[in-house]
Amino acid sequence: MEIKRESQLQKLISSKHNGMIKIITGMRRCGKSYMLFVLFYKHLLECGVDKNHIIKIDLEDRRSQVLRDPDALLDYMDNHIKDDKMHYFLIDEIQHVIDFEDVLNSFLKIDNVDIYVTGSNSKFLSTDIITEFRGRGDEIRLRPLNFEEFLSVWNGSKEKALEEYMLYGGLPKVATLPNAEKKMDYLRTIFAKTYITDIKERYKIKNDDDLDELIDIIASGIGGLTNPSKLERTFHSVKHSDISHTTIKSYLDMLQDVFLIEKSIRFDIKGKKYIDTPAKYYFNDLGLRNARIYFRQFEETHLMENLIYNELRYRDIAVDVGVVIVNAKNSNGVSMRKQLEVDFVCNKGSHKYYIQSAFRLPTAEKREQEVRSLNNINDNFKKFVITDDLISRYQDDNGIIYLNIYEFLTNPNSLNDN
């Protein structure tokens, strides 16, 4: 079964022949090898590239073990450059090669060589790319399937598909498994034996009880504002642990390094400045989040917020948490400053959007509650309320656009359509 990933594939296609080493990164099991060896390989053939000029090197395969020696890999690549036509090297799991950056950088000045690599999260992260390639590497971030891609292999209603997607996520393997039991077993297994192992190997963590507790806390509180100091107090009072906020921050950074979670910091919309703390953390795959807490918390409101965040990031939109500060009076008539939250402040190029996630809008009071922050933003950028209610797209008298979650997820231009 081939899952078409056109928008993600386009990132690779648009980077062809740019004189840099293309490094495909992303969380484990999100489809990096498949993207490189199947989809991109197929694209090159369709473009008329001779298959003898496409050299695939799978360093995960034991039969390629000899090529893990840097000099052997260098000789192998040199020997496959037969003429002046462009040669494409597709290399999977490059981290198995010691001094791989020296090998790859050796080809940067050769005009008819174009190199694409993937690497393991435990030894090859975004920070490594910045350090090792010093501006000569082009990082291409691959994410799990978005909902539109998931629908391409789904047989059933879109409503049932969304429920399935919010529960089991978008890892390609999960989308092809036949039943709930196999999906849950797969997700629980790879979380424990792949993602956590990556962190332990990378950072040499031996006592991981506090790390496990932290993951559980973040998984249970998606969409909630927090920071290392607040988490430290939770550990001290509830877990009776003496872990410091410095260690907690380090653990949170590690979880981001292996692409399990992402941090979204607050932005004062009227003051036009960032507020570093507290922040929100979202899981890059909902299935992994749910597996971590054994599928016990299926809160549609919070899951939909995480889902919208993931789709925005999939579209390469920068996402912050918005804060609108207004003057109000309390029950005693005393003036006070109040912070209203905007779920997402989104930026991409010259485009800017404000988005509220509202799972249900059953009453006028609920609708007013959701849009109060948006109505207090005094600029002309688009403002959206995304809801699971089966409504047609419409715009209210204040210019706020109401959008059904299915239209948002399946129409890549949903935020730019009139």
Image (tube, helix red, strand yellow):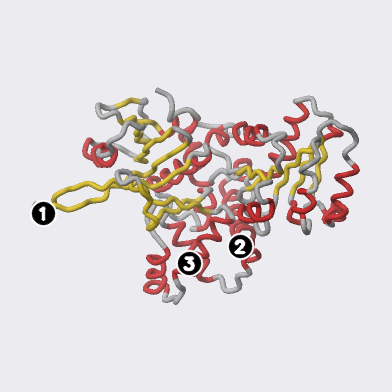
Give the residue type that dot 3 points to: Ile
Q: Locate residue 47 relative to residue 251 in the image: left or right.
A: right
Query: Which secondary structure, mark 1?
Result: loop
> Which one is earlier in the sequence, the residue at label 3 or at label 2?
2
Which residue in the protein does label 2 denote?
199
> Which one is earlier in the sequence, the residue at label 1 or at label 2?
2
Along the line of sight, the residue nearer the viewer: 381 or 56: 381
Residue for point 78% across, 42% down:
109
Which residue in the protein does label 3 denote?
248
| The C terminus - image quarter | top left
Marks 3 & 2, CB-CB < 8 Å contact: no
Residue for point 79% across, 25% down:
48
Q: Give x and y (percent) for residue 184.
A: 57, 52
> Which one is earlier in the sequence, the residue at label 1 or at label 3?
3
Query: Which secondary structure, mark 3?
Result: helix
Can you name the residue that lies furthest to the front here?
Answer: 109
Q: Give x and y (percent) for residue 394.
A: 33, 25
Q: Is residue 1 visible?
A: no
| The N terminus - image quarter | top right
Disc 1 and disc 2: Cα gap in Å? 51 Å
Between circles 1 and 3, the one closer to the viewer is: 1
